[in-house]
Image: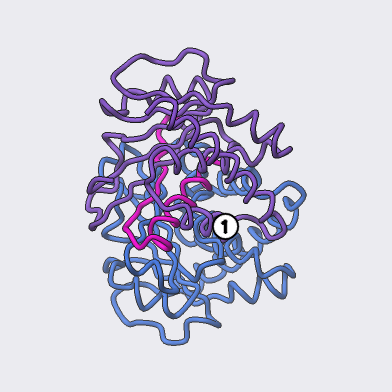
Chain colours: A blue, B purple
């Protein structure tokens, strides 16, 4: 990881992007002892359907907390993908849900099309953990935080009684990411 | 409200400051049709006990999403109050929990010491809604978003089945804020 790494998690409202962003930032800052910011900005487009959550992770102080040159974009819907792809930098990583993002934009970025929603729904049995599956994939593909840090951060944030469910979701996401990383990289 | 209004919600981990910030930003952006950002930044201090969540609300675009000159600081613990008071501007508003913040810092700001935790615990019967009580007080004191907007934003974000509980918590916070506003202002 370089000095500053920018991640945007995007999808539709209700897919848990903000919580996923908070968990990722806490993994970096609390468990991996880096610096991190997590933010949402809402303009007129907030009344539309796409939802985003930005995380910046850095070894040093983060003076400018706005994501402008994204290293990794995750999109769980076509609308979010179309809207935010413009901010992904050349050579960046694009991770999309394979069932919801059928038209993958073209560019110099590397694309990972993964069955994130399907894995949450069919393998884990709860669509609501798709955000945690996504986190697992992101961490394995980008290595932006350590496996231990993301696991600790997930377990600290999810509702009591759902730890095992979320641990399995994270694990399943890591497997998706790990396999994809090997195929493409 | 001026062009740009900065709010910091602070307390201890587990007091729901991030969710409160998200709700306030969504009230402003989705229901009041302003612009808003909500963010957390975590540095080395993230491993300590104080937790914060910043919200910026503006009539126009928010170019710089970092809170640096806070208009309203809410502190639910002494530690958070001591740590973040430095960023509150002269003539700003300081809202503290009266049971947890016994040493109120001195300055040119206006202080509101309110029984937020006690109201959540005794009047509503659930300490966990203290963050929603706090939102009610903030909105009545600052008028930074409309009553209707905060109610809609709360109801859209809280877990299904807890709407009535949270509506009562918001209402109780509004009463605290409204009374305090009349006494002091």
For residue A27: magenta? Answer: no
Name the residue furthest front: B182
Tell me where residue B170 sits by quadrant.
top right
Residue A122: x and y in percent read 72, 75
- Say what secondary structure mark 1 lies in: helix
Q: Give the residue pinned by disc 1.
A: B157
Name the image quarter holding residue B86: top left
A51 or A65, which is in the foreground?
A51
Q: Position of residue A77 (x, y in %)?
A: 48, 76
Q: Which range of residues does the magenta coloring cover? A: B16-45
Q: Is residue B176 above or below residue A180?
A: above
Q: At x 35% / y 24%, what residue is drawn? A: B110
Q: Is residue B143 above or below residue A61?
A: below
Residue B19 percent across, percent down from the top left:
53, 48
- The answer to whether residue B39 is magenta is yes
Residue furthest out toward the bottom: A103
Q: Is residue B67 left or right of residue B138?
A: left
Q: Quadrant of the C terminus of chain B?
A: top left
Which of B23/A104 is in front? Answer: B23
Numbered disc 1: what chain? B
């Amino acid at each position: 990881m370089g000095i500053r790494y920018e991640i945007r998690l995007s999808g539709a409202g209700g897919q848990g992007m903000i919580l996923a962003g908070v968990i990722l930032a806490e993994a970096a800052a609390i468990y991996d002892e880096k610096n991190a910011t997590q933010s949402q900005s809402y303009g007129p487009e907030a009344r539309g359907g796409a939802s985003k959550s930005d995380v910046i992770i850095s070894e040093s102080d983060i003076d400018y907390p706005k994501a402008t040159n994204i290293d990794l974009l995750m999109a769980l819907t076509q609308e979010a993908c179309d809207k935010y792809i413009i901010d992904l930098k050349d050579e960046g990583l694009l991770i999309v849900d394979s069932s919801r993002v059928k038209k993958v934009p073209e560019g110099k970025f590397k694309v990972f099309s993964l069955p994130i929603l399907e894995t949450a729904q069919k393998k884990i049995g709860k669509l609501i953990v798709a955000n945690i599956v996504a986190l697992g994939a992101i961490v394995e593909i980008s290595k932006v935080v350590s496996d231990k840090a993301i696991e600790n951060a997930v377990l600290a944030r999810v509702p009591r009684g759902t730890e095992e469910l979320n641990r399995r979701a994270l694990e399943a996401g890591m497997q998706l990411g790990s396999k994809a990383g090997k195929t493409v990289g």
